[in-house]
């Protein structure tokens, strides 16, 4: 395990590159309001905190029951739980790709921060019933969007560790799709940038339609 200071430095450097990847990925998403946010936040990076906390996920489904990272509204901050990431790597024999897994988690949470900034209602539990979509379904869509971007980020590298983690993550989507694991919805609903942009737009304009249209 690298010292916390080295970990923070790694994440800071990765985040700059993730931001560039995000802007390149989103350039084909035609939304005036989203474009305005991108322009206003071009040099902005969310604060990132590393923590050794291990936070259990109640009634978790899928391949792990510990939170790897978190994006919160206050300051659109990101938390990376490096002990949980280490456990994840051990469970899936990715110890040699630890930094790539950290980067995957960071990219996932960075997307959440940017998405939340543009569409806070996509994350509001109390608003969900009034929008005709259950929080469970909305969670599937927001998580699958973030995981798809993280996968795109990993695939943009030639580094073998990043490629290994990209293959691993996609295999989990496939393996756990039938278990209703929220991240695996990326395989079901977000298998292309076109669908990615469709969901992103519909979650903003008509959340109920986002799920109905893409589950047909």
Image (cartoon, rainbow, N blue to C red):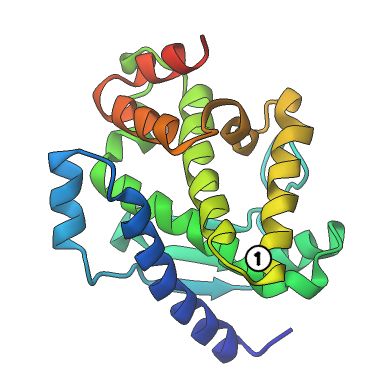
Mark 1: give few (<14), some (14-19) or many (20+) Cα within 10 Å. Answer: many
Closest to the observer: 72 or 212? 212
Q: Is residue 96 above or below residue 138?
A: below
Residue at 55%, 46% (x, y): give it: 147
Closest to the observer: 192 or 177? 192
Q: Is residue 50 above or below residue 22?
A: below
Q: How many marks?
A: 1
Visible residue check, residue 71:
yes
Q: Position of residue 167 (x, y in %)?
A: 72, 51
Residue at 49%, 35% (x, y): give it: 192
* Residue 175 in which image quadrant: top right
Q: Position of residue 17 (x, y in %)?
A: 42, 72
* Residue 158 in which image quadrant: bottom right
- Residue receiving disc 1: 162
Q: Is residue 178 left or right of residue 101?
A: right
Q: Position of residue 133 (x, y in %)?
A: 42, 16
Residue at 39%, 74% (x, y): give it: 16
Q: Position of residue 97 (x, y in %)?
A: 74, 71
Look at the numbered disc 1 and give the secondary structure of its residue: helix
Visible residue check, residue 83:
no
Quadrant (top left, top right, bottom left, bottom right) of the N terminus: bottom right
Q: Is residue 95 above or below residue 168?
A: below
């Amino acid at each position: 395990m690298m010292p916390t200071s080295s970990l923070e430095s790694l994440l800071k450097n990765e985040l700059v590159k993730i931001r560039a990847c995000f802007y390149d990925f989103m350039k084909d998403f035609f939304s005036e309001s989203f474009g305005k946010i991108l322009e206003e936040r071009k040099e902005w990076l969310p604060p990132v905190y590393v923590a050794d906390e291990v936070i259990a996920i109640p009634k978790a489904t899928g391949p792990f029951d510990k939170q790897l990272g978190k994006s919160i509204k206050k300051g659109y901050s990101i938390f990376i739980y490096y002990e949980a990431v280490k456990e994840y790597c051990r469970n899936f024999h990715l110890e040699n790709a630890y930094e790539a897994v950290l980067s995957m988690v960071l990219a996932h949470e960075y997307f959440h921060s940017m998405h939340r900034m543009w569409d806070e209602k996509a994350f509001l539990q109390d608003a969900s019933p009034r929008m005709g979509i259950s929080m469970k379904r909305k969670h599937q869509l927001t998580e699958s969007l973030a995981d798809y971007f993280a996968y795109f980020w990993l695939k943009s590298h030639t580094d073998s560790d990043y490629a290994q983690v990209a293959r691993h993550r996609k295999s989990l989507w496939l393996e756990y799709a039938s278990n209703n694991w929220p991240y695996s919805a990326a395989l079901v609903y977000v298998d292309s940038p076109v669908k990615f942009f469709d969901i992103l737009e519909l979650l903003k304009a008509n959340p109920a339609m986002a799920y109905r249209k893409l589950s047909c």
